[in-house]
Image: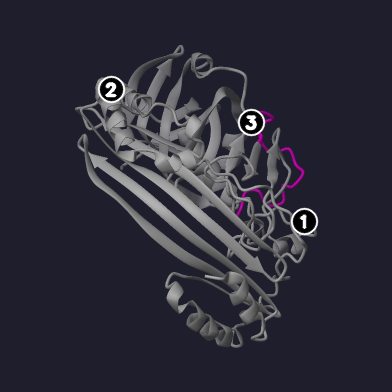
Amino acid sequence: MDIENLKDKLLKMNLDEVSLVLEEREKRQVRFSNNDIDISKAWLESSLNVFLSKGKKVFFTTIKQLDKAEELLEKYVKMIENLPENKDFYGINPEKQSYQKSKIDKELLNLDLEWIAREAINGAVEKGAQRAAGVIYRDYVKRKIATNYNYAEDEMANVDVVIRAFNEYKNAGQEAITTANSGDLEDPREIGQRAGTVATLGDNPKDGKEGKFKVLFHPLAFGSLVSYSLNLASAFMIDSGMSFFADKLGEKVFSDKFTLYDDSTFFGSGHRIFDEEATATRKTVLVEKGVVKNYLHSYSTARKFNTHTTGNAGIIMPIPWQAVMERGNKSYEELLSQIDKGLFIVNLWYTRFQDYRNGDFSTIPRDGIFYVENGEIKESWKSIRVSENMVHLFSNILDMSKERIWVKWWDEVIPSYLPYVLVEDVNITRSTL
């Protein structure tokens, strides 16, 4: 599909601005359960993200049936006349862009995903797990964008490995890693071994206790907290009054140990060189030593906030691409040794906000909840919930590990490069799930 030609045709239909993003994906999946491979398949996906404007009237959608794209677009152009105006729309970025060079490790395209699955299973069983289940994904995407002002092309490949290992009590350990660099893809047997070790340590878990605890969060667990928080750093969420970052720009809000970026320029699974309006992406400091430095912006939100776009335009609102957190200078073992009486939590899910504006949330630990005394894991817990406030939690960060891990897990954790994080005074309640 020639999207430049298609863009030119649309502009002749009395539109002011057009953004077309063509994505062509080659996806490969290997799924396994009960220590055996169930599914191994590959498929192609194509889509066209469409943004049209006339004055302050805007229209956006995604077209999956590309053979009907021109027919559908003519229909959408007629529809825009009947839409209400969006008072917060100031156009898409008109500035001519220069882009970093697209990066891709094509060795990822030649990996034997079935071998990775078998090795991960074997590693989990070696460490005492009775069975393992999970999925290996390889995603290869080619992306093109055409607007009134810019044209760019990008391509990217990444591999995601998710494995859950189960012990005899059906307690589990999970690993969910991602990589865009074949050189960083560690031995898959070791990935399985880590999941198997957590499952075995889980033993027969006891019902957890309520209270305030010092907690060491695994990068996967902290990734859930960071991922949901990054979405609330969108200027759209700020403007809607649905974010605990609102009215805090330039203020020291969190622990001075906490520095967080949205950085799609960093070569990871969330790497990309342009956003949905063809603005070149960049590294954006969101929090620096506890101080809120920036929000995530499109061209329109930046105009409204009297600042500059950060290259985070989604088709609807500014969105994060990839979380990167500064590391500490201690090992995971050293952080664990700092816990007199507390917890080590490997994974979180069902992270949900009760109050976006104030940051009140709850989330359920799973796949590795350990009670720690004097730096040693003493027992495994179950049936607890983290009932907290994001501002309070990020303010109570004590330290981070020098190790960082690439993690990603479906919609819970966006591509993130994070350390282990030690937090004090974390509120733990009981869960009925």
Residue type, label 1: His
Q: Would you say residue 22 sits in the magenta stretch? A: no
Q: Position of residue 199 (x, y in %)?
A: 30, 26
Residue type, label 3: Glu
The residue beneath circle 1 is 308
For mark 3, give the secondary structure.
Answer: loop
User: Residue 103's quadrant in the figure?
Assistant: top right
Q: Residue at x 33, y 34 (%)?
A: 116
The residue beneath circle 3 is 326
Residue 318 appearing in the image: no
The residue beneath circle 2 is 200
Residue at mark 2 to residue at mark 3: CA–CA distance: 31 Å
Mark 2 or 1, nearer chain start = 2
Residue closest to the eye, 381 or 272:
272
Residue closest to the eye, 199 or 21:
21
Q: Position of residue 359 (x, y in %)?
A: 57, 47
Residue at mark 1 to residue at mark 3: CA–CA distance: 24 Å
Mark 2 or 3, nearer chain start = 2
Q: Residue at x 58, y 17 (%)?
A: 330
For mark 1, give the secondary structure.
Answer: loop
Residue type, label 2: Thr
Residue at mark 2 to residue at mark 1: CA–CA distance: 51 Å
Q: Which residues are magenta?
A: 242-259
Mark 1 or 3, nearer chain start = 1
